[in-house]
Image (spheres, rainbow, N blue to C red):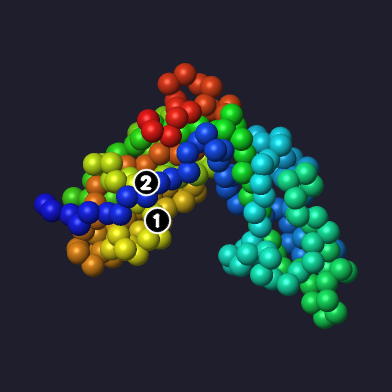
Amino acid sequence: MNFPRLNAVMFPCVVAGCWTQWFDRDDPSGTGDWETLASLHISYPEQICAAPLQIQAQTTTGLPAIATGNTFASYDTTVGLICKNAEQKKGTRCHDFQVRFLCPPDFCCFTEWFDRDDPSGSGDWETLFALRAEYPGHVCNSPLQIQVQTTDGYSVAIYDNQTFFLFFRADVTTGFVCQNSAQPVGHCHDFKVRFVCPKDFCQQKGKCSNRAGL
């Protein structure tokens, strides 16, 4: 079967660090939205490095924090994000924000590549649930990132419509799903996935590599 070639995409290399998942532990129903690093470390133990390199914030609907018009009491890698309702323009309040952090390379690593399914049925289902059942102990409990390639080595941008493939799901909660019925050409490529995991998981022998090319 001949597949259209996908655009090659360079993914962030682990030597530059890795982004955590998005965190949303508070909402603005009280005094504001307090996504502080101290509170997040308590709510999500071992999922955020002690000294993040960068912070990103957006609303829970995906609008960048700087585009909301909100004023922030704090927005940095030391304290985290604090938006106080009392400090907003009259008649407005804080949006509901989520934050993520860029951590140094020694905080994270890549798992091996996994390819448990092929698109001969309804599609290619590389879900975390199925991968954990088939490869017990090989994927961390809370992956920080997911990366996807075709089995012949072409990396793909999940939302790059130039690939002509529509993915039902690609995230660190579900994993990766490509459905044949959703594709303009009638079928998915055969994909493989890997995950970025925290350093405590990386230290388990044979589970991870700290190099992006493996």
Report the residue at 40% width, 60% height from top.
159
Badge 1 element: loop
Confirm whether residue 125 shows in the render.
no
Furthest-left residue in this view: 1
Q: How crowded is mark 2: few (under 14 residues within 10 Å), some or many (20 or more)?
A: many
Residue 119 visible in rendering: yes
Residue 134: x and y, percent? 35, 34
Marks 2/1: CA–CA distance: 8 Å
What type is the residue that disc 2 sits on? Val
Position in image of residue 34 (x %, y %): 78, 55
Which mark is drawn over residue 90? none
Q: Name the residue under label 1.
A: 158
Q: Please name the residue shown 18% across and 50% down the image.
A: 120
Tell me the residue that label 2 is attached to: 148
Circle 1 packing at 10 Å, graded few (<14), some (14-19), many (20+), is: some
Q: Which residue is drawn at 80% across and 55% down?
A: 74
Q: Which amino acid does label 1 sit on?
A: Ile
Horizontally, is 58 left or right of 80 in the view?
left
Q: Can you name the residue that lies furthest to the right here?
A: 86
Q: In this view, does 210 lie above or below 28?
A: above
The quadrant holding residue 45 is: top right
Q: In which quarter of the image is residue 214?
A: top left
**Residue at disc 2, secondary structure:** strand
Residue shown at 48% from the left, 28% from the top = 210
Tell me if residue 153 comes above or below residue 92 in the rendering.
above
Residue 12 picture location, percent across and down: 48, 43
If you read the primary sequence from the N terminus, does the residue marked by circle 2 or circle 1 appear first? Answer: 2
- Out of 163 and 140, give the one closest to the viewer: 163
Q: Are marks 2 and 1 in contact (CB under 8 Å)?
A: yes
